[in-house]
Image (cartoon, rainbow, N blue to C red):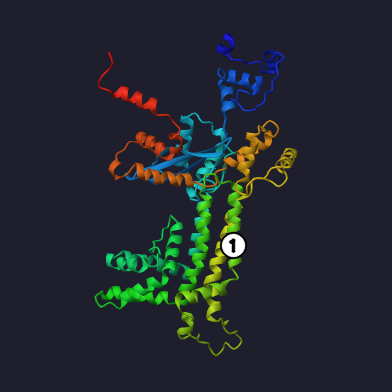
Amino acid sequence: MLQLASVGYGDWKHAPRDLARGLAFRGSSERVGSPQNGNFLGILELLAEYDTFLAEHIQKRVNKVSVDSTPDIANVDQLTIIFRYVLPDGPVERFVKFMPTRGHTGRQLADILLEFIEYNGISLKDLRGQSYDNAANMSGKYKGMQAILKERNHQAEYIPCVAHSLNLLGKCAAECCQSAVRFFMFVQGLYVFFSASTHRWNLLVDALKPLKCPTIKPLSDTRWEARYDALHALRKGYQAVLQVLTAISDDNDETYQTKVTARGFVSSMKKLETGILVEVWSCIMERFHKTSQALQDSNMTLNKATNLLQGLRNFIQLLRPQFQTFEGRGQALSGCHHYTEEISRKKRRKVGLDSEGESEDTSLDPSSRFKVDSYLPIIDQILSSMKTRLEAYDDDLEESLPEEMIHFSTLIKQHHFNSECKEIQMFKFINENEFAHAFRNVSVVFKLYLCLMISNCSGERSFSALKRVKNHLRSSMRQKRLNSLAILCIENDILQKIDTDDIIKSFALSKSGKCVI
């Protein structure tokens, strides 16, 4: 044993002869670290204490990584690192560290991450996935961070952040036609008009308060859900906002500029087109908002995320033939039953004498023209973008797996799982019943599948903690203290399980001015 402890064991070919001596290898458990795992795994655990290679092999975990960056209060660009791994209870995402960075290229960010992995003794071979936003420096096919890491480890599959992808396709739809661009400019302008004056803001709040309606909200380029908040507030308090604007436009105490601006907003809100767009975008953004909230769950799996996006696409597809429904809602909301084109005089194109053979312009009524020029482009842009985005999230589980999966499928038919996160429930079922020895390949497949990071929302949440930890009162905080406080704040659930009494006593004794003689 002394020789084994000093030089290690190397004759693995004759391990059964030299180590087992006729004892039963198998125990009631196949887990490393379990007291009932049998003689073979128990001997391996003993040998791992003296053999570093074996210890690394036994302790090896399948890991996924996600990074993102944001400037802090001191204008230092902080790169957050998030790891995802699988425990017997399911997947876990943990914040690891903030690292200062001076560049944003894919090579610079990849070098920082690789340096961190190497410094902490983490094997890059264990990396099985990576998830970032859709920025070119992250997702670039040739020079992006994901491509650089994949050169070092081809098994580190890249999955774009599903929540960010959802925001991008919504942004594309909001910029697909002139009417959509003008509409969101109108929504943002409405907020700017009221928020620029405390007097006007108080008038708006007083009008909305009896109706229990939220105040109008601003838009945001980075936080797409802000558009849902803005549209929801505008739709709920549409008539109250219109009344306040009318009162301001007729108030002789207001300046001419204010009155003219208010009259412009009143004119826009009394248009049928505005009413229709408010109803259409409110319906779309509500579903986007609910889907985005579900996708931000740290326990989200690839299969569930794909189903959510596919369900949203099917919902948008059902809206395509429902223009008349939104038209009726727009008429009720705006109080107008005629399009602007019907009210204004139609311009006729001048036709030359030699154009007898040319066909006349296709004549569309105002309702059909608005449908073709505004409504359908918005719906079709969303459907087209979602089809492209969904191609990046093909389901990782094939319909027909080898014989082991067929055997496993017959077993789970006897058990009823909830409709949500069946993959996690099946993985727990394998571990709780200690079926890993019978379904080894299935267990590995579930680990790899559950480890896939489909969003970087955990990184975005760490930025919120960064703003609370390093604020304007603590702007000169050093990096080591920042990371320590950030871990205590972000991973608070682990902190609650730690017994800090001994730590406090040791700290008190070390800082005490008096010593016991």
- Secondary element under disc 1, as helix, strand or loop, is helix
| 362 lies above or below 126 | below
Q: Residue sitting at 48 percent across and 40 percent down?
A: 82
The percent position of residue 7, horizontal first and vertical second, equals 57, 12
| 224 lies above or below 395 | below
Choose between 407 and 474: the one closer to the eye.
Answer: 407
Q: Dividing the picture into quarters, in which one does residue 98 lie? A: top left
Q: Residue sitting at 59 percent across and 68 percent down?
A: 320
| 40 lies above or below 451 | above
| 318 lies above or below 431 | below
The percent position of residue 162, horizontal first and vertical second, equals 54, 51
Which quadrant of the figure contains the N terminus?
top right
Q: Residue furthest top?
A: 2
Amino acid, disc 1: Phe
Q: How many marks?
A: 1
Q: Is residue 179 left or right of residue 191?
A: right
The percent position of residue 271, horizontal first and vertical second, equals 44, 77
The percent position of residue 436, horizontal first and vertical second, equals 66, 32
Q: Is residue 211 left or right of residue 157?
A: left
Q: Which residue is mark 1?
A: 315
Residue 298 seen in the current view = yes
Q: Residue sitting at 59 percent across and 60 percent down?
A: 313
Which quadrant of the figure contains the C terminus?
top left
Choose between 370 and 305: the one closer to the eye.
Answer: 305
Q: Is residue 443 left or right of residue 494?
A: right
Q: Mark 1 Cα within 10 Å, few/some/many (few <14, many 20+)?
A: some
Residue 176 seen in the current view = no
Choose between 465 and 379: the one closer to the eye.
Answer: 465
